[in-house]
């Protein structure tokens, strides 16, 4: 009998080891341990000191647990949470002294491939910890809107977190981390995507997040590509109907579904037109967001708010967003920045470099007739303007003039232009930049 017991014990140990070493991908997949909207109640996460200016989020018995992130099945955790820094109240400053870095995320996963629109969950945790340990105040959308309208003061350096589309990874991966950190955030949703099927969030997931620090904004109804908009002519009934559908109806749908004010909109892909910008207030939006990477200031146009798009394979964008030392704040690589007194280009430009323009919708141009070997095809040129990003420029091949006329007035006082062109025999483009100012004496209306 004793020998039989020893034999059974040995067999049990062997079977246990085999189970632990199984190659079954479903067994080893960490995603199956992520919280589910129908999961049984779990203990609430440990209390976290709130960030300066951000109230602590309420706890709930159904709060999802915060699990250690694992790079690949069977490996040790790739990252251990950093110790929580003691909260230090941040000094409030006058509205025009505050700058806000608005972060834009899309999807999250610890196991699926990293893409421009999907970031590794462990990297997202590290970024949130970096914000927390740097002592930068994370504000809610309500804080942001109150500051923009002049009814609230904020610290000099603030972060606003936004997440686009409505991917399920927002709920399973990002939300537990944001809740643990005590960070409010905004979900920009396009309503046709919120089905609960596949990779899309359900209504209940969104409602749970709203109960714990999330604000809902519109990201349109169908997330149309620019080519769809460009098939229609602005100012026509068909164009107005599409604006109503994408900007207006989407907000109404969200208000009905979630019984909440919908005060913000973000343009899909950042694509916007003067008619969208003009009509946004009529849909009760207080602000609309682009994808131009720069800091938001109190005088930033309310319906063209810039955001830093944090892509999975480009971590340096996040670091630039957290850099508040550079004046002007437009620090996206390859775009026109808010630098003043740049050396003028070696050819005529309008408005002239380092000069003050008395026109608030100036034609911006560069005379490239002195450039030898210039390739006249439009694809060989590029133009970016601070506050607008890449612009729809034109090129006069006869005069060799690269130019663009803004379709709306310029509100920023400091403007930087960056142009690029290619010449025969060279693969890399040439670059020139110059800055000019808009006269502060020009009436706003």
Image (cartoon, rainbow, N blue to C red):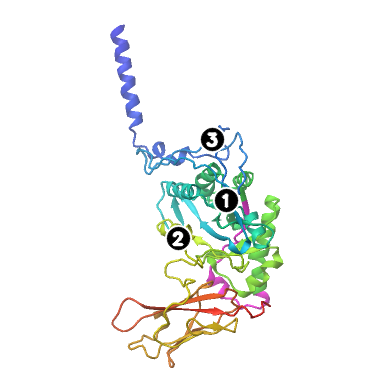
Mark 1 or mark 3: name the one nearer the start of the chain: 3
Element at label 2:
helix
| Rendering coords of residue 396 (x, y %) | 46, 89
- Within the image, what quadrant is residue 347 found in? bottom left
The correct choice, above or below, for 308 with respect to 110 in the image is: below
Q: Residue furthest top?
A: 1
* Residue wearing tag 2: 320
Q: Is 281 colored magenta in this rendering?
A: no
| Rendering coords of residue 196 (x, y %) | 57, 48
Residue sitting at x 45%, y 60%: 320
Which range is magenta?
Answer: 215-238
Q: Check whether the beta carbons of the residues at disc 2 and disc 1 lie within 8 A of each other.
A: no
* Residue wearing tag 1: 90
The correct choice, above or below, for 266 with respect to 178 in the image is: below
| Rendering coords of residue 144 (x, y %) | 62, 57
Element at label 1:
loop
Of badges 1 and 3, nearer the viewer stands 1
Q: Is residue 198 visible?
A: no
Q: Is residue 327 visible?
A: yes
Cα distance between the residues tagged 1 and 3 = 24 Å
Of badges 2 and 1, nearer the viewer stands 1
Q: Which mark is residue 180?
A: none
Q: Quick one: label 3, few (<14), some, or many (20+) residues within 10 Å?
A: few
Mark 2 or mark 3: name the one nearer the start of the chain: 3
Element at label 3:
loop
The correct choice, above or below, for 361 with respect to 306 in the image is: below
Query: How many discs mark residues in the rendered view?
Result: 3
Quadrant in which the N terminus appears: top left
Q: Is 225 colored magenta in this rendering?
A: yes
Q: Nearer the viewer, residue 77 or 81?
A: 81
* Residue wearing tag 3: 46
Cα distance between the residues tagged 2 and 1 = 21 Å
């Amino acid at each position: 009998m004793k020998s039989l017991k020893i034999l059974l014990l040995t067999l049990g140990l062997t079977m246990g080891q085999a189970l632990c070493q199984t190659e079954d991908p479903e067994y080893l997949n960490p995603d199956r341990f992520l919280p589910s909207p129908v999961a049984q109640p779990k203990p609430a996460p440990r209390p976290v000191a709130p960030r300066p200016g951000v109230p602590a989020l309420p706890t709930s018995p159904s709060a999802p647990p915060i699990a250690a992130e694992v790079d690949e099945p069977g490996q040790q955790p790739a990252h251990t949470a950093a110790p929580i820094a003691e909260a230090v109240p941040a000094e409030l400053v006058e509205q025009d002294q505050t700058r806000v870095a608005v972060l834009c995320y899309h999807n999250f996963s610890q196991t699926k491939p990293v893409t421009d629109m999907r970031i590794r969950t462990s990297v997202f945790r590290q970024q949130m910890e970096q914000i927390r340990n740097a002592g930068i105040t994370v504000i809610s959308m309500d804080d942001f809107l109150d500051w923009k309208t002049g009814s609230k003061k904020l610290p000099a350096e603030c972060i606003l977190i936004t997440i686009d589309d409505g991917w399920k990874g927002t709920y399973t991966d990002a939300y537990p981390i944001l809740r643990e950190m005590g960070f409010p955030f905004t979900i920009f949703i396009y309503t046709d995507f919120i089905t609960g099927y596949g990779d899309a969030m359900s209504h209940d997931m969104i409602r749970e997040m709203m109960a714990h620090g999330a604000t809902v904004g519109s990201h349109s109804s169908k997330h149309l590509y620019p080519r769809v908009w460009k098939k229609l002519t602005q100012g026509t009934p068909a164009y107005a109907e599409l604006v109503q559908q994408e900007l207006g109806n989407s907000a109404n749908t969200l208000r009905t579904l979630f019984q909440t004010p919908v005060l913000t909109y973000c343009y899909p892909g950042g694509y916007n037109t003067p008619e969208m910008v003009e009509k946004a207030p009529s849909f009760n939006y207080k602000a609309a967001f682009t994808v131009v990477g720069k800091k938001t200031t109190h005088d930033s146009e309310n319906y063209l708010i810039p955001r830093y798009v944090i892509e999975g394979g480009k971590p340096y964008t996040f670091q630039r967003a957290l850099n508040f030392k550079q004046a002007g704040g437009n620090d996206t690589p390859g775009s026109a920045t808010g630098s003043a007194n740049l050396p003028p280009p070696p050819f005529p430009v309008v408005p002239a470099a380092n000069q003050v323009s008395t026109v608030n919708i100036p034609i911006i141009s560069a005379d490239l007739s002195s450039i030898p070997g210039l390739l006249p095809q439009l694809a060989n040129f590029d133009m970016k303007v601070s506050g607008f990003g890449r612009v729809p420029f034109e090129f006069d091949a006869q005069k060799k003039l690269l130019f663009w006329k803004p379709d709306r007035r310029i509100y920023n006082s400091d403007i930087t232009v960056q142009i690029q062109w290619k010449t025969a025999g060279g693969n890399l483009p040439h670059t020139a930049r110059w800055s000019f100012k808009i006269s502060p004496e020009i009436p706003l209306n």
